[in-house]
Image: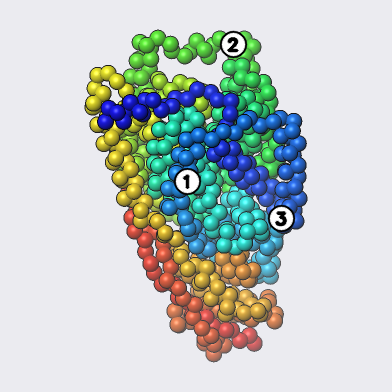
Amino acid sequence: MNRLLSRLRALDLDRGPQSSITLSEAILCALIASIAVAGWASLGLAIVGLLTRGALLVVAVVCTVIVGVGFRRWPPPPVVHDHGDVIVLLACLIAAVFYLPGADYLFGDKDPGVYATHAFAIARHGSTEIPDEVGVRLTGFDGGYPQGGRFAGYWYSSNDRVAALPQFFHMFPSLLASVKLVFGSTAVLQANPIIGLISIGTLTAVTRRAFGIVVAGIAGVVMATNMVNIFFAKWPSTETLAQLVLAGIALLVILAMETNWAPFALLAGVLASISFLNRPDGVLIVLLAVGAIAFAVATFVDTRLIVAGSIGLIAPLPWVWFQAYERNAAYASRNGVPSDRVVVALAVAALVAGFGVRRFAPDLLPRLVPRSQAALHRLAVATLLVVGAWAAFSGLRPRLLGEAIQRLPNRPELATLDEVNLRRLFFFFNPAGLVLFWIGVAVVVVIHRRRNAWVLLAPGLALLPVYIWKARISPRLMWWGRRFVPAIVPVIAIVIAVAAVWLLVRRGRWQGVGRLVAIGCLTLVLGTQLYQSHRLIGYREWDRSGGFLEQVEDLAGGDDVVLVWESPTSLVSPSTLAAGAMWFIHDRNSLTLRAEPTPNDLDRIADAFPGDRLIVFTHTDDLPPNLDPARLEPIGVVAADVTQWGEARTTVPLFYNTFPLRMRAWSFEPN
């Protein structure tokens, strides 16, 4: 044990600045830049209806020229190879075991399905707005969803019902649409797991920059095997892309500070804006980026880096502002995005404060940093007390403040379980992880006071209380966990690794106890994660969903048809799952009947689509009341056994359900 610990101490646990970059960092930076620019360009082209292979080729050529000119004007730092590259590769390989293959998620029941189906529709039409013949020709079949949409998540872009503009921000489905155009349909469902692999590699690489190779190795394993990370990496989700963007910002900022290469700062600024293009809560990252620029101004960071970062942050803002405050204003507002005036006011206030400190009190911030050993000890104790009190308050919140209630339009009140967010979060790390996290925060605050550590951890530590206080998401445990993927899960994993290594290598009193705590807690954390996550290996949510849709398409054949679905009976009713997907993926006019259809409903549909064949799908072999059996001829059955991960609110679901989907198809004979 002593020999192992001496070797640990000999490793680079707290690296100094380096003017070169490693091979893995160079590859990761290239991949991150490519994904960010592809997402930005895809959304811009899709907004104006010009997303095509040719347009993407033009963008690629322009970007290649810009990079070539930029490299001649600002030669990049030298690239070297070291043991950190091996650690990054191993973390990616571990993640690959859990993340791949991607889910066959082609049903429109929840956000991932709408992202995926929207991607197919964007690729076909070249636009985020999808034409809707049903909306133009018919009224009264909208299903009663918000914004007048006919299916959950598939909203109309305006009151004229000419086109659908699904809820959510549209950069991610636009990026998936580009993936389809370039690599084909299969790649759409594998894109997010690959983004997840790159994210794990980036987080491991940046942790190595901030804390050394040992911490990076442990953190990489903890992140790659965490159930929440795996759950959302396996199917289309903006959270995994948001995690990559945040990890990329941290890596690029640290590389910019260590190498003094301005393009790193430029790209970091671009990524900060991209985070707001990707998700509504990305506004917090934009504000944190502005705060970081103000802090850099106040602390006399190299002016070139400040200017480059500012230019990168501003460049995508027209897209950001249009999406958040024009096209998707209702969705942004419902997700708590502050108004554009508030965002501008906060940004201006931060910059004024930064320039004010630089001009009038340049030594203010350095004087706030404790230097004596006694002051550091007091800071450590204060940190432990504050973090412990915060954790205790989070656990006692329901007793102190009452139960949190979520109120949605046209739905009953629902307990959001916000009051137990911290407890639920550590279901996925084991309580031993909370102990290491508690110790690790104090270690970071007192010992690891270099800029690199705070560039990596400060955003997550700042956002952690915000999300613990108000998750603003479904009380279902796994679905609730999505908000914690981008910033919170990585920062907890990294701090756990920092605490474990510090306890292992520290000398002095209680060093034996510290080592036992480190080994025991880390074993429990990894054991818990592997027990939870091994069940997800090879699992694919809504497996065979694509096959179910293909059966419907086979019934339609090459004819012009209208698909008419019996009213959904539940959230996993076949008509709920397939109706919108058939419209967006296979370009079929598709709609659901009312819960109690009238005898002339099918005639109305047939009159609105003269010459088109009507195929009616029912949940059983019996027709709904009021439909004339003499005019409906059975033509087949579509069926598949599909899988869905278990739902739970207060325990971690460790199982999936397999259940049959079956619908009877009928051909309608118009008058």
Q: Secondary structure at mark 3?
A: loop
> Percent x, y for residue 171?
62, 49
Q: How many marks?
A: 3
Circle 2 Cα neighbour tier, 10 Å, few/some/many (<14 / 14–19 / ≥20): some
| Residue positioned 54% across, 71% down in the render | 549
Give the CA separation, mark 3 to mark 2: 49 Å
Q: At label 1, which amino acid type do we have?
A: Cys
| Residue positioned 44% across, 44% down in the render | 90
> Looking at the rendering, in which quadrant would you find the N terminus?
top left
Q: Which residue is mark 2?
A: 362
Disc number lying in front (1 or 2): 1
Circle 1 Cα neighbour tier, 10 Å, few/some/many (<14 / 14–19 / ≥20): many
Residue 66 drawn above or below residue 458: below
> Percent x, y for residue 600?
59, 80
Q: Which residue is mark 1?
A: 92
User: Reading the chain from its start, which is encountered first: label 3 or label 1?
Assistant: 3
Foreground residue among 5 and 446? 5
Q: Which residue extends farthest bottom?
A: 630
| Residue positioned 39% across, 59% down in the render | 645
Circle 3 Cα neighbour tier, 10 Å, few/some/many (<14 / 14–19 / ≥20): many
Give the CA separation, mark 1 to mark 2: 43 Å
Q: Which residue is mark 3?
A: 51
> Percent x, y for residue 560?
67, 78
Give the CA separation, mark 3 to mark 1: 31 Å
User: Reading the chain from its start, which is encountered first: label 3 or label 2?
Assistant: 3
Corner quadrant of residue 599:
bottom right
Corner quadrant of residue 142:
bottom right
Residue 496 drawn above or below residue 658: above
Asked whether disc 3 touches disc 2, contact meaning CB atoms under 8 Å apart, the reply is no
Q: Is residue 389 left or right of residue 470?
A: left
The answer, for residue 40, to whether it is visible in the render is yes
The answer, for residue 349, to whether it is visible in the render is no
